[in-house]
Amino acid sequence: MVKTPNGFEQPSPWLSITNKALEQLRGFAAEFGMTPATRSRVEALPVPMGMDRARDAKRRLLFGEGNGKLAKYLRHESDEDAKERRYFGDG
């Protein structure tokens, strides 16, 4: 509360600014699926096999496909790596 020049108390102007900013933030959060209610409605589209750049980069780095530099330093493959290679069709 702030006092007016007449001596009356009224809500601070910062209160209305804060409330407006909070409403905008809630609107953005709902628009981008960042609230529990809207998060349940967000769906990811399946990525076609040839367009998964992250998986392709990982395969190049770990297994030496293309310009991978790390593969020559990997001496032993763990069971998880072997399973992953079989899953992705590399072994």
Image (cartoon, rainbow, N blue to C red):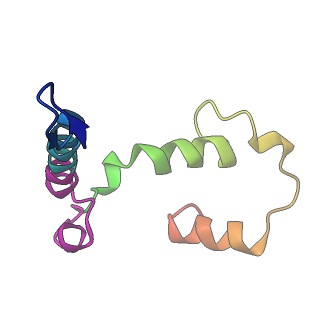
Quarter holding the C terminus is bottom right
| Residue 34 as seen in the image, left or right of residue 57 | left
- Horizontal side, residue 11 vs residue 34: left or right: left
The residue segment tinted magenta is: 26-45
**Total residue callouts:** 0
- Residue 16 on image: x %, y %: 15, 41
Measured as percent of width and height from the top left, residue 58 is found at 57, 47
Front residue of this view, candidates 40 and 8: 8
In which quadrant of the rendered image does the N terminus lie?
top left
Magenta highlight on residue 49: no
Query: Residue 34 sits in which quadrant?
Result: bottom left
Residue displayed at 73% across by 33% down: 69
Q: Position of residue 64 (x, y in %)?
A: 67, 41
Within the image, what quadrant is residue 4 found in?
Answer: top left
Position of residue 78 in the picture relative to residue 85 (left or right): right
Vertically, is 38 above or below 34?
A: below
Question: Is residue 33 part of the magenta span, yes or no?
Answer: yes
Residue in view at x 64 percent, y 41 percent: 61
Looking at this view, name the residue that lies furthest to the top: 5
Q: Which residue sits furthest front?
A: 7
Who's the residue at 88% across and 53% down the image? 75
Residue nearest the observer in this picture, 90 or 21: 21
Residue 40 versus residue 22: which sits nearer the camera? 22
Horizontally, is 3 left or right of 89 in the view? left
